[in-house]
Image (spheres, rainbow, N blue to C red):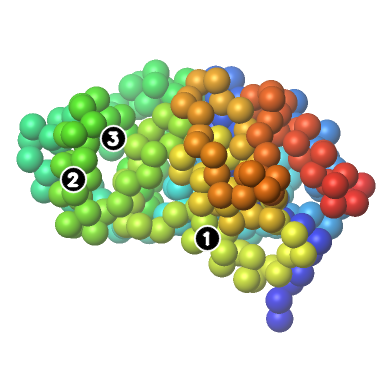
Amino acid sequence: MKVSCDLIVFTDLDGTLIDHHTYDYAPASPALNSIKNLSVGLVLASSKTAPEVSKLRSEIGVEKWPAIVENGAGILAPFDTGCHDDSSYQTVRAALEQVPDDLRRLFCGFGDMFVDQVMRITGLSQTDAELAQSRSFSEPGIWSGASAQKDIFLDILKDHGVRAQQGGRFLTLSLGANKVDQMRDIITAYAPLNTIALGDAPNDIAMLEAADIGIVVANPSGPSLPTLRGEKEGRIIRTKDAGPVGWNTAVLDALMHLNLK
């Protein structure tokens, strides 16, 4: 039997619900409280690992809703704490070892880094950086080569079944599933009357375009997203404020628009 609800909000985390630099989501508290007081689901959809998302989901108080982890490569079931088999991650890492050395050295994944390096590039505490390295499905990293070299790198990985998604900061490698794939499965399971999606990076585009209302959250730290399908018709809008401040205003406005108060 399907569980139905009035609305599900699907949201990216870094640079969207939480501040890109401080990881604070307090400015979004008014909208988060409204969501919890209404018949509204909140699905976190992030490049973060299941243990990271489980911790944040518990802090926000939305453990009863599933979450999308590692850029959609995995799903975190309601109340799950996030301990998953890592065979998919090991497959991605094995594929990286098939890349010629001159290209392989241009990609530095989380699995190539010591924890202090992850702390430095993310701004996370040691505990949270260790959680970020506890991966089950995907490998985020930094590409330091030219665009043409990147194309060759990704073509080689594609031959080994590995796909790439570009986020706000990291290039993430996985076996192919993405945020919108998991989003569609959740919509099928919960049958919401309406859906909202919020994001700020290229890996959020498909999710934004699939929602009834898509909200591009301003991100001064990253490149602006191109005009999206449905934007000219007003189905997709953009916030003026960045991060949780923009998120808060946009969600409250959307709840008002849908007559959910």
Other residues around mark 3 within 10 Å, as few (<14) / some (14–19) / many (≥20):
many
Residue sitting at 15 percent across and 49 percent down? 156
Figure quadrant of residue 159: bottom left
- Mark 3 vs mark 2, CA separation in Å: 10 Å
Q: Amino acid at mark 2?
A: Leu
Residue sitting at 69 percent across and 68 percent down? 190
Give the secondary structure at mark 3. strand
* Residue that lies at the very extreme toward the front in this rendered image: 232
- Mark 1 vs mark 3, CA separation in Å: 24 Å
Residue 192, position as x, y percentages in the image: 73, 64
Is mark 1 in CB contact (under 8 Å) with mark 2? no
- Mark 1 vs mark 2, CA separation in Å: 25 Å
Residue 101, position as x, y percentages in the image: 7, 35
Q: Amino acid at mark 1?
A: Gln
Q: Is residue 15 left or right of residue 98?
A: right
Pointer 3 residue? 109
Q: Nearer the viewer, residue 124 or 237?
A: 237
Give the secondary structure at mark 1. helix
Q: Nearer the viewer, residue 219 or 92?
A: 219
Is mark 3 in CB contact (under 8 Å) with mark 2? yes
Please tell me which of labels 1 and 3 falls first in the chain.
3
Residue sitting at 56 percent across and 67 percent down? 185
Q: Amino acid at mark 3?
A: Gly
Quadrant containing the N terminus in the rendered view: bottom right
| Residue 79 visible somewhere in the drawing | no
Question: Residue 172 shows which numbered tag?
Answer: none
Other residues around mark 1 within 10 Å, as few (<14) / some (14–19) / many (≥20):
many
Residue 240, position as x, y percentages in the image: 69, 25
Figure quadrant of residue 20: top right
Other residues around mark 2 within 10 Å, as few (<14) / some (14–19) / many (≥20):
many
Pointer 2 residue? 96
